[in-house]
Image (spheres, rainbow, N blue to C red):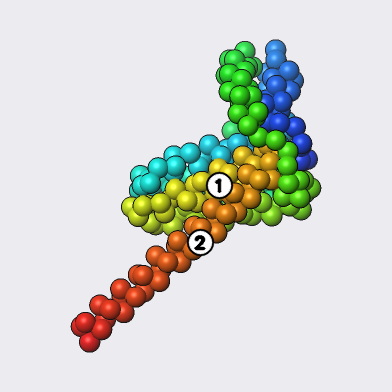
Amino acid sequence: MQQTMTFDDTSRSLSQTLRDLISGIRGKTVSLRDLMDQVGEQGLLLICAVASLPFLIPVSIPGVSTVFGAAIILVSIAICLNRMPWLPARILDRKLDSAKLVPALEKGAHLVGRVDRFFKPRLAALTAGGAIGRINALAITFGGVLLMFPLGLIPFSNTLPGIAILLLSTGMMQRDGLVVLGGYLFLAITTVYFGALTFMAIAAGKGLAGTFA
């Protein structure tokens, strides 16, 4: 049985989403399925944003980008399809004690609330509506693919797509089209950068071939 479910887009701030979630689960026993169904797209976008954070340094730890990149790709595809990502039923239906979960969520809502004020709904054409949401999700998927390229030891090869993913995810969460636009800009910069690396590698290869010809 496919362990997925659909959910609708939301225009609420992430902090409000978390507060509504806290109100809905307080004093109850809930499952991961329940939580993901309630936070919907924003919860998945938060996963993408958090997964991009380890790459905001010039050189990343080799191998990490493959794991996190794959996670970002799977989650962003789920967003594009407007469905919850597939997980084993034993994980989705595992019962969680809200008495332990609520305090952590309250701290998270407080921290997110402090960030919310730096974002505001603008350039709605880049955030409003299901169609543009799917396009933005595909852009995050593309960023995840770039993140998985085996170039972790080359400066900025993980940082640039990491920044793009962070901006796209955060901009979508906060309905801030200007931040989303910044994400697309970093995707373009990453593509040009990788193209330049490929060109230099090909040129170096031809040079070596000419030397031994």
Picture quadrant of residue 104: top right
Would residue 137 appear left or right of 197 to someone viewing this image? right
Q: Residue at x 44, y 57 (%)?
A: 149
Q: Nearer the viewer, residue 181 or 19?
A: 181
Amino acid carrying mark 1 in the image: Ile
Horizontally, is 183 left or right of 120 in the view? left
Q: Which residue is mark 1?
A: 165
Reply above or below: 119 against 211: above
Residue drawn at 39 percent across, 65 percent down:
197
User: What's the residue type where badge 2 is placed?
Assistant: Thr
Camera sees residue 87: no
Residue at x 73% of width, y 46% of height: 123
Where's residue 211, x and y in %?
Answer: 21, 82
Residue in front for this viewpoint, 15 or 189: 189
- Image point 70% across, 21% down: which residue? 19
Looking at the figure, which quarter contains the N terminus? top right
> Would you identify the image quadrant in which residue 198 lies?
bottom left
Q: For residue 206, say whether it is visible.
A: yes
Residue on which the image places disc 2: 191
Residues tagged 2 and 1 counted as in contact (Cβ below 8 A): no
Residue 18's spot in the image, x, y percent?
Answer: 68, 25
Query: Mark 1: which secondary structure?
Result: helix
Q: Nearer the viewer, residue 199 or 120?
A: 120
x and y percent of residue 62 in the render? 35, 48
Instruction: Name, please, the residue furthest toward the left.
Output: 212
Q: Answer left or right for 168 relative to 189.
A: right
Which quadrant of the figure contains the C terminus?
bottom left
Location of residue 179 (image quadrant): top right
Is disc 2 surrounded by few (<14), some (14 to 19) or many (20+) residues within 10 Å? some
Mark 2 element type: helix
